Image (cartoon, rainbow, N blue to C red):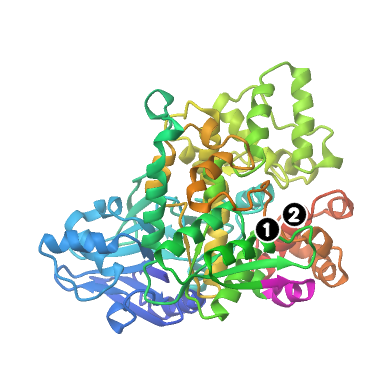
Amino acid sequence: MCGIAGIVMQQQIELRLNRMLNAISHRGPDDKGIEILQNDKWFCGLGNTRLAILDLSNAGRMPMEDKKTGNWITFNGEIYNYLELRKLLEMRGYQFNTQTDTEVILKGYSEWGIGVVNYLEGMFAFAIWDKSQKALFLARDRLGEKPLYYYSKSGLFVFASEVRAILASELVARKVDPVSIQIFLHNGYCISPRTIIEDIRSLLPGEWMRVSYNGSIIEQNLYWDVPTFRSSKDAFAFENTEHLLEILSLATKKRCRSDVPLGAFLSGGLDSSIIVSLMSRTVGDVRTFSIGFEDKDFDESPYAQWVAKKRQTHHTEIILTLSKFNAWLDAALDAMDQPTFDGLNVYFVSRAARESGLKVALSGLGGDELFGGYPYFKAVPILTKLQGLTQGLNNAIKLIASNIAGLHGWRKGFYIFTNKFNKRDRLLATYQISQSIFPTQFQNRYLGLPAYEENWEGLPREFYEFINKSEQDDDDLSLLSRYVLRIFQGERTLRDSDMMSMASSLELRTVFTDHVFVENIWKIAGKIRCSGAPDKPFESRLFRSLLGDDYPYRRKRGFVFPFQKWLLSASLREKVMERLNNEELLSIVGLNNINPIIMDQRLPWSRIWAIYVLARWIEKNDIHK
């Protein structure tokens, strides 16, 4: 796990590249390396900040060269099947000088070229300088666990693990992207390929790119997508799912490969309990971490304690009080590479785990997207079907949706559903409105923000096309699961988890995102695996032999902080209101009058919090119109 950066341009670049690496030093505090490659008058600079996990010796330093080909790599992530690939390559005559997965990618590129991405299992973002082709090859993992951002214009190409690193190069203007502002206000986070900064883009999950020595993009393609469910050929009965436990068990075992101390996040919920139980089979001596609250309405720590005792883990529990929250809050907000209204829980538990000596932790993130662990898995399909009926009923649906979105005092004249949508688009639009902070049409009508064609119901047009490239799943819940996996998981929880854990120099590994497991679970109809939302009864049955009948099965509830109460506290509210009253700051994002929103006490905490986080990030990073 590391931070990567690079520049291609017709100037000396070492000083700029150093500034980029300094901006992401938290991602790799163990080492820093730079390699400048020259081709005529053009320079390609590769940089890396290393968090040493495998082969802790200097042999694992990056950027790393393949002496035989002259190719160079800078890499962020973990290749979980690197031992298996290494044996395969050794059988084909390749010799290795390190014990790293980095060298496996480099040798694999020599053997398979850009096809190497099809062999890799894991989370990754990397760039390889191909000496023979005088080109840069960049790739990102299938589900978007590792970020990879870039900026491209004539004669210049810049890339990095974080947006802030690209800004640190001083080659890109600190100018806000107005379309991404609206996308953030709709969702509470930004969505690829756009970023909060105009002209900085993100590679999409499962995408690769080739860049010429002169900085121009040669080609860009997807190499993987979520499978399409077809009931006629894919569906099978529950009795034939035993192999799924075996696949997840193997995925967990591979994610326990580490040369440094390793543990797990344990909430006591179904997903994290499954992962910890699988780890106890593989590692034996497991260290677990959880967050609890003094407020019993939010505290689930007794369930985590039960699992820890059952699996005999070394358990650490953090009781998060308002005073401790306030003490750590600024550091957590500073960790945001892009603004997000979520992710603070990952920061707190990651910081505690790192301070306890861990460098690697496993997480149960991803199970809810595959097994219907959110209430909208039940509500959205119903609303979508009703929407196709009479206009009178349609108006009632709008009213229900506005309540779901929390816009209680603003629903008059609020429209989101239209008859122009096909069935697939209606499902996606219904999902988007059910999860919205400030729906796009609400922004246009009440906040006075302009309508952009590049914004499709809170999604960048490019992303809308990306998730609808494949054929439509013929099962509504499979299709909804696809959208949740790609939007909520890929653009929110995975990105938040990456930046919040890496802020503490902690590598976070997610097991349910294993692409082999995803491909196999997708052969089960969504109406089966996502039924009973949000309690995930299918997942409970699937892993009952692992958890045991005495596991405290219970109704699903999300892990949330008592923000609604804490925002009303004098200490936190003062911080929030200071920025929400800064008219100059809010004008940068086009919010010239938000007093009605601030004064509406019925709005959930997330609405006010999202605007505060956005304003704070804009100010902290010196962003302008």
- Image quarter for residue 373? top right
Residue underneath mark 1: 341
Chain part drawn in magenta: 318-330
**SS category of the residue bearing label 1:** loop
Can you name the residue that lies furthest to the left here?
A: 93
Q: Is residue 298 above or below residue 334?
A: above
- Image quarter for residue 538? top right
What is the magenta segment's predominant secondary structure? helix
As rendered, which of 430 and 381 lies closer to the eye? 381
Q: Image point 75% across, 54% down: which residue? A: 606
Q: Residues within 10 Å of mark 1 (few under 14, many from 20)?
A: many
Q: Image point 39% across, 74% down: which residue? A: 53
Q: Amino acid under label 1?
A: Phe
Do the residues under discs 1 and 2 have CB atoms within 8 angstroms?
yes
Q: Image point 76% across, 72% down: which residue? A: 321
Whole-percent x, y for residue 391 in the image: 75, 18
| Residue 324 is one of the magenta-drawn residues | yes
Q: Is residue 1 left or right of residue 367?
A: left
**SS category of the residue bearing label 2:** helix
Q: In the picture, which quadrant includes the C terminus?
A: bottom right
Residue underneath mark 2: 606
As rendered, which of 620 and 329 lies closer to the eye? 329
